[in-house]
Amino acid sequence: MDKQLIADRFSRACFTYERQALAQQTIAHNMLQIMLDHHLPMGTAMAEFGCGTGFFSRLICEHFRPSSLLLNDLSSAMEGCVASLLNDHVSFRAFDAETGDFPQVQILCSCSALQWFVHPERFFERVRHCLLPDGWLAFSTFGPDNLQEIKALTGKGLTYPDMNDLQAMLEPFYDLCYIGEECITQTFSTPMQVLRHIKETGVNATAPHRFTPASLTHFCADYQERFHDDEGNVRLTYHPIYILAKIK
């Protein structure tokens, strides 16, 4: 996993991300609702890893009103995107959350970021030490069916743990209070719009497939043939997994 490439791709996508990332915005709202439904504490110390352009961060600030909030992202360019949130209680630090240190918090949360970690099981073990007593780890990530259309045609994509894998990683250190999954289908008029969406959200950050003119034509024809609906639109699948875990 090339973390510098990931940071570069998301930095370049920071001005187009929120316009394109409709599925990710739905996921952020769903993650927030799960946290609210399970009555996670408000007005307490929080940190968010992989904050990106701050869509989930703004929801957290509005609904949880944390006493302190550290926003973190691999890309330093995201500080500009969350600048309007920063004050005496909300700060930003750019570092690799998989290996970096967090302050002591009651809630460590994230939306659509953990899939970029090489060893999530080590992260789960390590960050329990930053959680205060009765602390929470609340996050969404993606499951094996994520972007399945792209992987089917290019053979490229991340390897995603499923819910059972994640549960096994977490259970030695946390009590699982919620785990659930869904598939969200985003539709586009053409396969070229799918590729534009992927570029402008940065989700091609690992090893983007490089097309020749001939292979691009072939890809678009295959995509249209295999993944179209009755109206001729084409789909792209997101497979979020939502988890709430309380430190043991």
Image (spheres, rainbow, N blue to C red):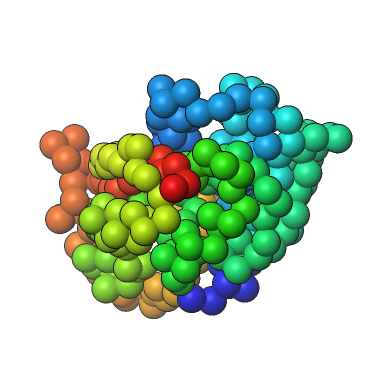
Q: Is residue 85 left or right of residue 140?
A: right
Q: Is residue 129 left or right of residue 196?
A: right
Q: Is residue 41 visible?
A: yes
Residue 233 at x, y percent in the picture? 25, 41
Residue 218 at x, y percent in the picture? 25, 69
Q: Is residue 70 left or right of residue 124?
A: right
Residue 164 at x, y percent in the picture? 23, 56
Q: Is residue 77 visible?
A: no
* Residue closest to the eye, 200 or 6: 6
Residue 125 at x, y percent in the picture? 48, 62
Q: Residue at x 75, y 48 (%)?
A: 92
Q: Tell me if residue 132 comes above or below residue 147 in the rendering.
A: above
Residue 62 in which image quadrant: top right
Q: Residue at x 13, y 36 (%)?
A: 230
Q: Tell me if residue 187 comes above or below residue 12 in the rendering.
A: above
- Numbered circles on residues, count: 0
Q: Tell me if residue 124 comes above or below residue 26 in the rendering.
A: below
Residue 60 in which image quadrant: top right
Q: Residue at x 47, y 46 (%)?
A: 247
* Residue closest to the eye, 145 or 66: 66
